Amino acid sequence: MRVCLASTSPARLMLLRQAGIEPETMAPEVDEESVIAAVEAAQGPLAPDDYVLLLARRKAADVAARLSAEQPDFDGIVIGGDSMFVLDGEILGKPYTPEVATERWHRMKGRTGVLHSGMSVFRLCPDRSAHEAHAAAAASVTFVADLDDDEIDAYVHTGEPLLVAGAFTVDSLGGPFIERVDGDPSTVVGMSLSTLRRLVRRLGLRWTDAWTSS
């Protein structure tokens, strides 16, 4: 079974590889800010799960449509995902700058926030209509309380937290600064593998059919 990851995220690619899947990748052509702005203008502010699900579904749908047009013989699944971190009810996206990342870490140390992850899976099969399943997952993340200014500065200086939701990773340099994760740990990396498995089963497939390595 072929698998296409509708993402350019190195973390999501690594996650699937660690789970035995070597996916094809295709970058979704979705203007995330415009999508959110249009929906919120019509419906009002989105809850975190609705936010990440909306973007995950749009990304997966975009890639699924292009694959169907460009590769009509594609037989497999397309996986899309989106994540956001919430602390005190405030969405903390990618900080982009060292100043914002530093301020985030001073706020987060010793506290607990929630990482929300939305996932969408499209089943593509020649001569059949595409089918989709989607779900959101969440995991609580508690940060160490004794993080000092020098450690924060050193971590921010690596550049790692600048382009990730919440300004942290659990599977790389940021891992030692995380005290506890409550929920599927892979959710914090970028996608809940247990949730993805359930979505694949909902589409009538087995997760193990996607394995490309043992």
Image (cartoon, rainbow, N blue to C red):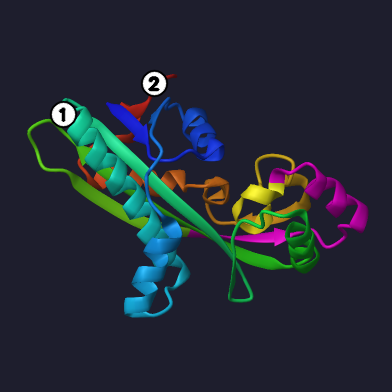
Q: Residue at x 81, y 65 (%)?
A: 106
Residues at marks 2 and 1 touching, judged by CB atoms closer than 8 Å: no
Describe the element under mark 2 as helix, strand or loop.
Answer: loop
Say whether residue 163 is left or right of residue 118: right
- Counting labels gives 2
**Magenta-span inclusion, residue 129:** no
Quadrant of the snapshot with the N terminus? top left
Describe the element under mark 1 as helix, strand or loop.
Answer: loop
Q: CA distance from mark 2 to mark 1?
A: 22 Å
From where the camera sits, is residue 118 visible? yes
Mark 1 closeness class: few <14, some 14–19, many ≥20 residues within 10 Å: few
Q: Quadrant of residue 212?
A: top left
Q: In the rendered view, tell whether residue 20 sits above or below residue 93.
A: above
The circle drawn on residue 59 is none
Residue furthest to the left in view is: 127
Residue furthest to the bottom in view is: 44
Say whether residue 193 is left or right of residue 115: left
**What residue did someone put label 2 on?**
212
The front one of 80 and 206 is 80
Q: Position of residue 16 (x, y in %)?
A: 46, 33
* Residue segment shown in magenta: 138-160
The circle drawn on residue 72 is 1
Q: Position of residue 178 (x, y in %)?
A: 73, 53
**Magenta-span inclusion, residue 154:** yes
The front one of 93 and 1 is 93
Q: Position of residue 79 (x, y in %)?
A: 35, 41
Quadrant of the snapshot with the C terminus? top left
From where the camera sits, is residue 199 visible? no
Which of marks 1 and 2 precedes in the sequence? 1
Q: In the rendered view, tell whether residue 70 sits above or below residue 160.
A: above
